[in-house]
Image: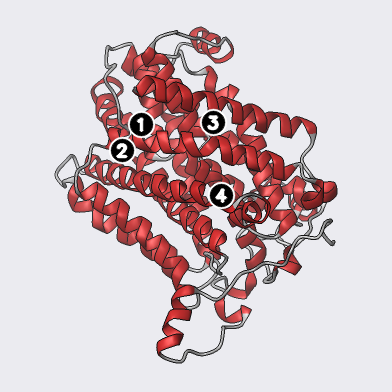
Amino acid sequence: MAMHGAEPPADEGPDPIRAAVARVSPLPDEPSAKGVAKARGHEAATGASPAGRSGLDEARRRGPLGFLQLLGPGLVTGASDDDPSGIGTYSQAGSQFGLGTLWLAIFTFPLMIAVQEACARIALQTGVGLGTSLRRKFPTVLVGACIVLVFCANTINVGADLGAVAAGGSLLTGSHVQPVWLLVPVALVIGVLELRLSYSTIFRCFKYLTLALFAYVITVIIVHPPLLATAEATFIPHLELNRDFVGIVVAILGTTISPYLFFWQASSEVDEMKAAGATTEQERRGTTRKELRAARIDVSVGMFFSQLVMYCIILASGTVLHSSGHSGIQTAQQAAQALKPLAGPFASMLFALGMIGTGLLAIPVLTASAAYAVKEFFGFRGGLSETPHARPTFYALIVLALAGGLVMSALNIDPIQALVVTAIINGVVAPPVLALIALLARDRRVMGEHRSGNLSAALVWIATMLMGAAVVTLIVTVV
């Protein structure tokens, strides 16, 4: 299916590192598509057919197992949204305000679906990542500034999450192993996962790591929240016009609707198509209603799990920590430690295990999304579906983000202050990027008959205005 409009072909140039080496010492010609692919047999991680997203009919025939196999980028995106820094934010909200912010999990759910579905839609129709699509349509300076800030915010977030995963590992050993001793092993495991494993194996690992989210669902069952109060807090919004409450609402919005998720969703859709055999932009351009429907299901399931975990963490911490006077919780590890004497060691262990699992999922997504954004802006090749030997610059960016986060974590920089900085950066970046996504998804020249509908576009614009209001409020609160 040809794409409407006269979009230029992908201007993906040679890998900058390979080009620099070639000027000094001759290198073999650019590897063939088969030579760069990491996925064995060009098999998409979702198990879909060669189009990457056209397995919906087959999934229906196979029943529940077929739909589980169909899930991919959207599921991973939703799960990675609940990284340790987000878990810390939700724990803080519950410990300070009880169930007062529980309604935000329901309120932000349709906004997240609309935003991530728009990113997936753009990638499926254009055949390129979000950075490339934005650079082609909007001013280079604006897009470039956003991408620089996304890379910085991701690196800071990686540092905070590495520290949290190490702290979670320390908690499981009874604090016999200090967190600082676990930082390098955790970083090495994540580095090997991204650099060495095949694309389909990486995504299977990501899918299995999403099971860590159920730790928080089980924790809620253990703590027995009050049903009537829970139902009331879920459906009746609670607002307080004070600095602390406004600050936590802004923090929740910032950690829930984060710019790195936009780039990851689009780029992983493109990688799915590459791994399924569509190695050129021309082969990837254009989509079908069936493919969009499959992507929407994937995104909706992913965002549901994301918000379910947010809901469960606020509910568990609000039920146990707030009612017992533990209102000073600021990090996920503090929440895990506080739960032990109040809800039993099993609840504490589950909380720590969830923190480790979501961290091991979120850190690769953070580093890879930063690399995707940069490479798409500068127009060179690279992706998790391709080998480090063929695309060294892309993987160098991943290592740079991981190393920067490791250094930040090893220097023992206050994670709360780091996350405040990250929230400010994300707050500055999110509104303009969301506005550009909203405009691009509705552009008939680019999207043709597959542009976003009125409801989806309205929800994206609501998210844009909310994030804009959030950053203004955050700056006023900080000042």
Q: Provide the secondary structure element on which disc 3 rests.
A: helix
The answer to whether residue 287 is seen in the rendering is yes
Residue hosting label 2: 418
* Quadrant location of the N terminus in the rendered image: bottom right
Out of 177 and 84, give the one closest to the viewer. 84
Alpha carbon separation for disc pair 3 and 2? 24 Å
Residue hosting label 4: 143
Kindly identify which numbered label has been placed on residue 88: 1
Quarter of the image for residue 47 reads: bottom right
The amino acid on which the numbered mark 2 sits, given as a three-letter code, is Ala
The amino acid on which the numbered mark 1 sits, given as a three-letter code, is Gly
Disc 3 residue crowd, few under 14, some 14–19, many 20+, Cα 10 Å: many
- Is residue 344 rendered to the left or right of residue 78? left
Quarter of the image for residue 413 reads: top left
In the rendered image, the vertical position of residue 89 relative to residue 445, given as above or below: above
Out of 304 and 160, give the one closest to the viewer. 160
Kindly identify which numbered label has been placed on residue 307: 3
Closer to the chain start, of discs 3 and 2, is 3
Identify the residue at horizontal 44%, vertical 73% (top origin): 392
- Viewer-nearest of discs 2 and 1: 2
The amino acid on which the numbered mark 3 sits, given as a three-letter code, is Gln
The amino acid on which the numbered mark 4 sits, given as a three-letter code, is Val
Closer to the chain start, of discs 2 and 1, is 1
- Viewer-nearest of discs 3 and 4: 4
Out of 371 and 178, give the one closest to the viewer. 371
Closer to the chain start, of discs 1 and 3, is 1
Residue closest to the far left: 176
Out of 47 and 249, give the one closest to the viewer. 249
Q: Provide the secondary structure element on which disc 2 rests.
A: helix
Closer to the chain start, of discs 2 and 4, is 4
